[in-house]
């Protein structure tokens, strides 16, 4: 993403309009080409040297944005694990020599370097080689001019979403497989939304709480929304509407597939599974007691209310769908319980992170709800295999 000072936008009539770059903009293409060439030999260079050259090359917010995105493509080497020991050894030698007979600065440096078996000219650089600016670019993943411009436009959207109060995403004319992948990615990024299905318009609308509505979790949640959006933009027909707090004012931010935002996000089906999901499934599937897999389809809870479970568990002859509620999903928990109770949904369980119960009103509702008592369980941070097993057995 770009930082707030690097994004370019105008506000008119209460709406936010990003200054996207058109693919045929000659000035922007020239700026992108110059910086792409500058970074072409980034691998092996010291970060500070590369940054100094970049500062001389950039002169506009747009070119600084290009430079930020290209710098993000650099993988910087980790510092030598022995550098701290070397530094302390150098300080010890320096202190001992300082207390000895008086010598000049040049003689002192030469003497310290000699005792350490280092060249005097290399001593200072080695001493501070673990500083971020002194590290070396280990690998650089190059971008073409076109890819850099596309990334610049996309980064505007993801940056603005970090300042959203509410976000609504509508996708139209997508396949069943694409719908499943959309919901799977929503879950894997630990986002939760109210889902509305318009069968006549063949549309699916997801309403998410923005990061500015979630105190204490704002930064992490903002990154999750930003990482989720590129997949949305890879779909054939989509629309984004968000209420943004920008420069102290509430403004509306609207985009669709015609806006010029391009992403090469993969549309693979079920390709990525987070580590915590994977570990839980592996542990449960290692025994013959029960089997678990990622959710694959929607559950209809009546009156246009749908949910997409995180897991589906098979236990004996029963199949149970399991949906998890994390702290940033608090707003949806009561609605989900009421919908499941009203529709008398069977084969459906919910797991609730314990911190949600700090809300006394929500805790009182859950403790006095019959459906919750029979079909819900609590966990800390993320449910362990044993927690899920006990909940499933109790439900069954």
Image (cartoon, rainbow, N blue to C red):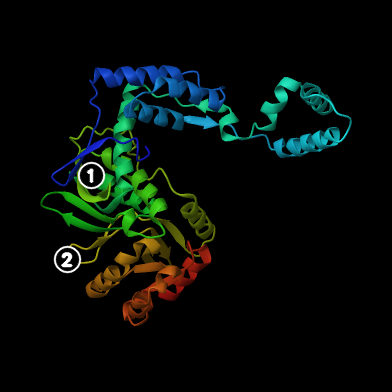
Residue toward you, 42 or 5 = 5
| Residue 41 in view here | yes
Residue toward you, 32 or 170 = 32
Q: Is residue 266 left or right of residue 302?
A: right
Q: How far across and how far down the image is residue 238, in percent?
A: 20, 42
Disc ID at residue 303: 2
N-term mark: 1 or 2: 1
Please, which residue is most extreme toward the left here? 200
Q: Is residue 111 left or right of residue 58?
A: right
Identify the secondary structure beneath mark 2: loop
**Up/down of 47 relative to 233, above or below:** above
| Residue 317 in view here | no
Image quadrant where residue 67 sits:
top left
Image quadrant where residue 15 sits:
top left
Q: How far across and how far down the image is residue 351, in percent?
A: 40, 67
Q: Residues within 10 Å of mark 2 (few under 14, many from 20)?
A: few
Please, which residue is most extreme toward the right here? 101
Q: Residues within 10 Å of mark 1 (few under 14, many from 20)?
A: few
Q: CA–CA distance between discs 1 and 2?
A: 22 Å
Residue in view at x 70 percent, y 32 percent: 127
Residue toward you, 368 or 210 = 210
> Which quadrant holds the C terminus?
bottom left
> Which quadrant holds the N terminus?
top left
Q: How far across and how far down the image is residue 353, in percent?
A: 43, 67
Identify the secondary structure beneath mark 1: loop
Residue for badge 1? 175
Residue in view at x 42 percent, y 28 percent: 70
**Up/down of 392 relative to 179, above or below:** below
Residue in view at x 18 percent, y 55 percent: 197
**Up/down of 278 relative to 104, above or below:** below
């Amino acid at each position: 993403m770009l930082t707030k000072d690097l994004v370019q936008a105008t506000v008119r009539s209460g709406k936010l309009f990003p200054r996207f770059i058109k693919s045929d903009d000659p000035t922007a293409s020239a700026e992108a080409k110059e910086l792409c060439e500058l970074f072409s030999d980034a691998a092996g260079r010291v970060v500070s040297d590369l940054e100094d050259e970049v500062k001389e090359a950039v002169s506009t917010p747009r070119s600084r944005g290009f430079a930020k995105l290209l710098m993000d493509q650099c993988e910087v080497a980790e510092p030598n694990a022995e550098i701290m020991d070397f530094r302390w050894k150098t300080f010890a030698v320096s202190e001992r020599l300082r207390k000895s007979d008086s010598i000049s600065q040049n003689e002192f440096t030469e003497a310290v370097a000699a005792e350490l078996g280092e060249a005097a000219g290399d001593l200072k650089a080695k001493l501070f080689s673990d500083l971020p600016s002194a590290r070396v670019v280990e690998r650089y993943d190059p971008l073409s001019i076109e890819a850099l411009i596309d990334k610049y436009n996309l980064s505007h959207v993801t940056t603005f979403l970090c300042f959203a109060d509410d976000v609504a995403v509508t996708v139209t004319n997508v396949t069943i497989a694409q719908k499943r992948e959309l919901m799977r990615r929503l879950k894997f990024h630990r986002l939760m939304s109210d889902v509305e299905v318009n069968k006549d318009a063949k549309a699916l609308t997801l309403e998410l709480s923005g990061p500015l509505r979630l105190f204490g979790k704002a930064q992490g949640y903002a990154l999750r929304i930003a990482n989720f959006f590129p997949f949305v933009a890879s779909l054939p027909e989509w629309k984004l509407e968000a209420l943004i707090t920008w420069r102290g004012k509430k403004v509306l931010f609207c985009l669709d597939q015609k806006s010029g935002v391009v992403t090469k996000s993969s549309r693979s089906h079920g390709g990525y599974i987070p580590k915590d999901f994977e570990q839980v499934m592996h542990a449960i599937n290692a025994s013959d007691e029960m089997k678990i897999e990622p959710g694959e389809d929607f559950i209809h809870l009546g009156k246009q209310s749908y949910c997409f479970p995180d897991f589906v568990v098979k236990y004996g002859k029963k199949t149970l769908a399991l949906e998890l509620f994390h702290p940033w999903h608090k707003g949806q928990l009561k609605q989900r319980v009421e919908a499941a109770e009203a529709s008398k949904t069977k084969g459906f369980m919910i797991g609730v992170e314990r911190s949600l119960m700090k809300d006394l009103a929500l805790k009182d509702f859950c403790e006095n709800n019959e459906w919750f008592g029979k079909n819900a369980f609590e966990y800390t941070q993320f449910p362990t295999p044993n927690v899920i097993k006990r909940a499933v057995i109790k439900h069954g």
